Image: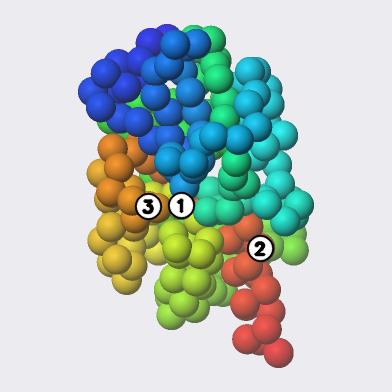
Amino acid sequence: MISDELASLIREGYNALGELEFKPSSAGYRLYHWADRYALDGAHIYHSAKDARQIAKFDAGGNYRALKGAPNLPRRWILELANINELKRALDYFYPGAIATWLAYRKGKVEVVCLRQTLNRQTGMYRVTRKLTDDQARSLVKEACCSERRCLRTIRWGIEMEGPPDFLPSSKSDPTVDQTGQHRASLPFLCLEACNLLVSAARTMVKKSSG
């Protein structure tokens, strides 16, 4: 079971995922925002993994978080979870499929899809994204996927089939690197294919460039 493998990862020393940190507690497991690590006193305490879904929905300003990997989770909360199954459920609400994808990746059981493959299969109003040039793609990915401002996912796809993008910092495609810059033992939130938001942004870019 994935929960058992998560427990094994924790024993290996992993204690973070994205903006989250977790650790064993007297109640089971404690989950919180990394920036609150030394300021948990007074934080609102929750006791159900389902509460993670609501916490993850909006940023601190009340704005809807359309991108799950965005580095803008709200702070000042603690999830006290009874067991490893509840911890796994909570992590999935914050970062859907992150654990399962990482486990499958380590076993060589996932497929990485390059950007050209993703764009070439678009139809309807998104068919125009096939016209995105390599220079446009580089510019778009640099801006839309930046860990500091936009997305904490670790990108494993490139524009073409050759592998991870060489126009980004090598850390952006390295699963061993904590994308928050905190140098923690963090599980990666892998990106194996360009997301719908990037495809939509590609459409906008092509439309603008074509007048």
* Front-most of residues 140 and 45: 45
The secondary element bearing badge 3 is classed as: loop
* Front-most of residues 100 and 89: 89
Query: Measured from the top left, where is residue 125 in percent x and y?
Result: 74, 63
Near mark 1 (Cα within 10 A), the count class, few <14, some 14-19 or many ≥20, is many
- Determine whether, in the image, residue 147 is placed left or right of residue 197: left
Q: Which residue is mark 2?
A: 200
Name the amino acid, label 3: Gln
Quadrant where the image shows the C terminus: bottom right
Residue lying furthest bottom:
211
Near mark 3 (Cα within 10 A), the count class, few <14, some 14-19 or many ≥20, is many
Mark found first going from the N terminus, 2 or 3: 3
Q: Which mark is residue 43?
A: none
Is there a contact, CB below 8 Å, between mark 2 and mark 1?
no
Q: Residue at x 70, y 42 (%)?
A: 57
Q: Which residue is mark 3?
A: 179
Mark found first going from the N terminus, 2 or 1: 1
Q: Residue at x 55, y 20 (%)?
A: 80
The secondary element bearing badge 1 is classed as: loop
Mark found first going from the N terminus, 3 or 1: 1
Q: CA distance from mark 2 to mark 1?
A: 19 Å
Residue 2's quadrant in the figure? Answer: top left
- Determine whether, in the image, residue 134 is placed left or right of residue 78: left
Near mark 2 (Cα within 10 A), the count class, few <14, some 14-19 or many ≥20, is few
The secondary element bearing badge 2 is classed as: helix
Quadrant where the image shows the N terminus: top left
Q: Say whether residue 136 is visible.
A: yes
Query: Measured from the top left, where is residue 42 in percent x and y?
Result: 60, 35
Is there a contact, CB below 8 Å, between mark 3 and mark 1?
yes
Q: Residue at x 68, y 52 (%)?
A: 60
